[in-house]
Image: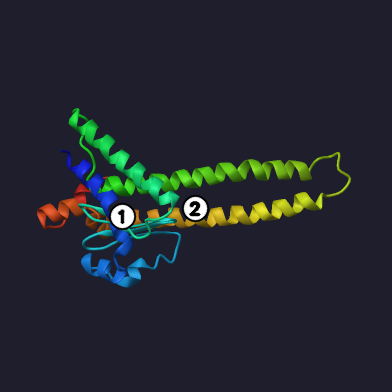
Amino acid sequence: MCGLVKRAVTVLLLHVFLLVIKKSDLAARHHLALRDFRFSTSTSILVREHCTVVGLQHIKAIITAQSVTFLEARGPLMVDFVKELQAHLQTICLDQQDGGAEVLPYEFVVLETMLAKMIAALDARLEELEPAIAETLNGLLDPRLSSIDRGQLHILLHLSKKFSEFQALLDDFTNTLDELAESEDDLIYMYLSHLQQQSCERDPDDIEE
């Protein structure tokens, strides 16, 4: 059986099992500090010696070279995401068995899936806000109106607040990725599979954009 399929099964087992694991025990298992679980911003990617701790809105997880552990695994959004992740891993595995191109290490496949989910959520939110804002502005600028519609103005103020929240979320996401891309050490230590197999640092010259 393809290793990715085995790990896909592990994802679901951890998803259920994590409901009874204390964070202190989890931190000790992965050589983490409890502060690594604070997730003070909407987006965080913390690269540690033995794992990567990811916080992307409702997705909060610990990624290792062999598994992914979700810190908050309950709720329909997380259940759906775990199923998507398992399906994605299985698809990659089947493609590889059919002679497909070499795939990324397990930890990068998982992180890539999480980032794609976050981007899709941001896109969906923007597609929801833009038409609503445009419609409200058109209503306020209607030349047939003799005065400003206070109801429409209230809606616009509400949408403006929502758009500001969206912009802050987007900025946090992009800034986190920019900081990660600029940290050579983090990029090296994210290659958990390589470091585990070779027990040495990856040559910085091997890092591809």
Instruction: State the colouring used for the structure image.
Output: rainbow
* Amino acid tagged 1: Val
Question: For residue 56, which numbered disc appears in the image?
Answer: none
Residue at 66% in and 43% down? 132
N-terminal of the two: label 1 or label 2? 1
**Quadrant occupied by the N terminus:** top left
The image shows residue 120 at horizontal and vertical percentages of: 46, 43
* Amino acid tagged 2: Leu
The quarter of the picture where residue 139 lies is top right
Judged by depth in the image, the label closer to the viewer, 1 or 2, is: 1
* Image side of residue 197 versus residue 83, left or right: left
The quarter of the picture where residue 101 lies is top left
Instruction: Residue 115: tell me if it is visible.
Output: no
The residue pinned by badge 2 equals 170
* Mark 2 neighbour density, 10 Å: few (under 14) some (14–19) many (20 or more): some
* Image side of residue 53 versus residue 98, left or right: right
Number of numbered callouts drawn: 2
Callouts 1 and 2 close, C-beta under 8 Å: no
In the image, farthest residue toward the left: 198
> Closer to the camera, 12 or 163?
12
Instruction: Residue 93: tell me if it is visible.
Output: yes
Residue at 45% in and 59% down? 42
> Closer to the camera, 167 or 10?
10
* Image side of residue 7 versus residue 70, left or right: left
* Mark 1 neighbour density, 10 Å: few (under 14) some (14–19) many (20 or more): few
Local SS, label 1: helix
**Quadrant occupied by the C terminus:** top left
The image shows residue 103 at horizontal and vertical percentages of: 23, 39
The quarter of the picture where residue 128 lies is top right
Q: Is residue 48 above or below residue 110?
A: below
The residue pinned by badge 1 equals 16
Residue at 80% in and 53% down? 150
